[in-house]
């Protein structure tokens, strides 16, 4: 979703978490707290439920 909107990882995580921690969430080595889902959903101007589905789809691939 971030990529399709042309948002770099650095811009997406800026002021929320480090890029390194973001990678831990993406590759599944750490569980993402729900408050971060809220922050990322707000950054993408979408509902957190939609964002959660996107993360699940990414994990399945």
Image (spheres, grey):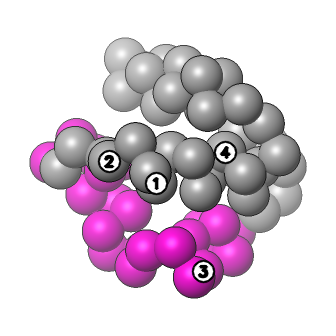
Spatial CA span between label 3 and label 1: 12 Å
- Residue 27 - label: none
Helix, strand or loop status at disc 3:
loop
Q: Mark 2 touching mark 1, by CB under 8 A?
A: yes
Spatial CA span between label 2 and label 1: 6 Å
Residue 25 located within the stretch drawn in magenta: yes
Label 1 crowd (10 A; few <14 / some 14-19 / many >=20): some
Spatial CA span between label 2 and label 3: 17 Å
Residue placed under numbered mark 4 in the picture: 41
Helix, strand or loop status at disc 1:
helix
Residue placed under numbered mark 1 in the picture: 36
Range of residues picked out in magenta: 8-29
Q: Earlier in the sequence, mark 2 or mark 4?
A: 2
- Relative to 35, 4 lies left or right: right
Label 3 crowd (10 A; few <14 / some 14-19 / many >=20): few
Q: Earlier in the sequence, mark 2 or mark 3?
A: 3
- Relative to 33, 46 lies left or right: right
Residue placed under numbered mark 2 in the picture: 33
């Amino acid at each position: 979703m971030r990529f399709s909107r042309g948002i770099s990882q650095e811009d997406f995580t800026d002021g929320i978490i480090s890029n390194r921690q973001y990678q831990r969430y993406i590759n599944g080595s750490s569980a993402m707290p729900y408050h971060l889902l809220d922050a990322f959903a707000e950054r993408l101007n979408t509902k957190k439920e939609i964002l959660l589905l996107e993360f699940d789809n990414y994990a399945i691939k």
